[in-house]
Amino acid sequence: MKNKISSTILFIMHMPPPVHGASMVGKYIHDSKLVNETFNCHYINLTTADTLADIGKIGLRKVKSFVKLLNSIEKEIKRLCPDTVYITPNSAGGAFYKDFVVVEIVKRAMRKCGRKDGNIVLHFHNKGVSTRQERWLDDKLYTRFFKGVNVMLLAESLYGDISKYVERENVAICGNGIPDYSAEDIVAHKKSDEKNLPHLLFLSNMMTTKGVWELLDALYILKRKGRNFVCDFVGGWKDIHEEEFCARVSEYGLSDCVYAHGAKYGMDKEEFFKRADIFVLPSYTEAFPLTVLEAMQYGLAVVASNVGGISGQVSDGLTGYLIGGTESILTLDYKPNPQELSDAIEKLLNDMDRCRTMGQEGLKRYKQEFTLQRFEERFCECIQKPGFARKI
């Protein structure tokens, strides 16, 4: 991609703060030398929340910020008359209604500046359309929302979420990537067979929908069968509180092998990846969790629910095990089965050589598909897909 494409793109996307998956990807795009050299780029921050706790809340300050945002979008489109407007909207609920207004403003502003052949690209970092499309109001809004736009998704398995409204030819697949470590760092962290016990790692927010309780149930099953392991739970306390978690651990007799560490960042978080063998994420729902990519980067076998776009990250039977069936789950009524979860973990505990092989296959897949460099290349390829950004 050596030739500069003289397309002007206005990026309207989430950027930190607060820090979450979509905002971090927004930062990667904003800071990308390749993206900024390939296109004539301009940026507007779509975020109106200051903290993670502020997301979803409504207040006078946020209303004022939203009105200011809409005005900024209209003025910037009028000034630039861009070839493409790129937006990272939410897919469902109150956040979708807000972003519906953003997209409508963009469409109107593009028409006003005479850019009828201009393109609007919606890049989804979440899912939920299919769970709301049977509601009369949401169905009407989605029909209008998706009219005349192109869509970028994180994985092929997520297309079913929007298939009612968007033709497949108007969709590009662009899985996220994360910053890469050197090969020496990856090799250096892997320990030899001198470890006494296999280490499992759960790293996410301590929430019911992340499958925390089902994982504890699965560990209880394994403990009763005489399996030996250590499992670290790393993540901030959300709707699950430390006291109730520790009480359940004690009740199950897991106090000697299950440890909760709270939220960890930077090098503190990396230490847990370095000493782990198996990464476990039995979520009820996900889109394309960056923590799974981090686990693959550290050469860990992954056990995860087959929800959202995770099947686009984990190859079942090759880089880990997916639970919940062979088809990706897009509904909101899934809960992982503790017995199925414990069986998948036990397969790895019973064959640690196989576990390490799966981890190495995951690392190989990460390096091929999910480095930040590969994401930037794929992102530019998707934006330049025929029917997306118009080349001048």
Image (cartoon, rainbow, N blue to C red):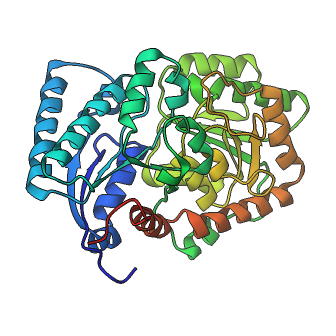
- The residue located at (23%, 46%) in the rendering is 45
On screen, 277 above or below 97?
below
Residue closest to the eye, 375 or 156:
156
| Quarter of the figure with the C terminus | bottom left
Relative to residue 267, is residue 62 drawn left or right? left
Could you tell me residue 23's position as x and y percent?
Answer: 35, 46
Q: Is residue 167 visible?
A: yes
Relative to residue 119, is residue 342 drawn left or right? right
Residue closest to the eye, 178 or 155:
155
- The residue located at (47%, 59%) in the rendering is 178
- The residue located at (34%, 62%) in the rendering is 389
Could you tell me residue 216's position as x and y percent?
Answer: 71, 27
Relative to residue 280, is residue 174 drawn left or right? left
Q: Is residue 228 visible?
A: no
Could you tell me residue 299's position as x and y percent?
Answer: 66, 61
| Quarter of the figure with the N terminus | bottom left
On screen, 115 above or below 222?
below
On screen, 191 above or below 124?
below
- The residue located at (31%, 39%) in the rendering is 18
Q: How many labels, in total?
A: 0
Extreme residue in the bottom direction: 2
Relative to residue 305, is residue 174 drawn left or right? left
Could you tell me residue 22's position as x and y percent?
Answer: 40, 45
Residue closest to the eye, 329 or 269:
329
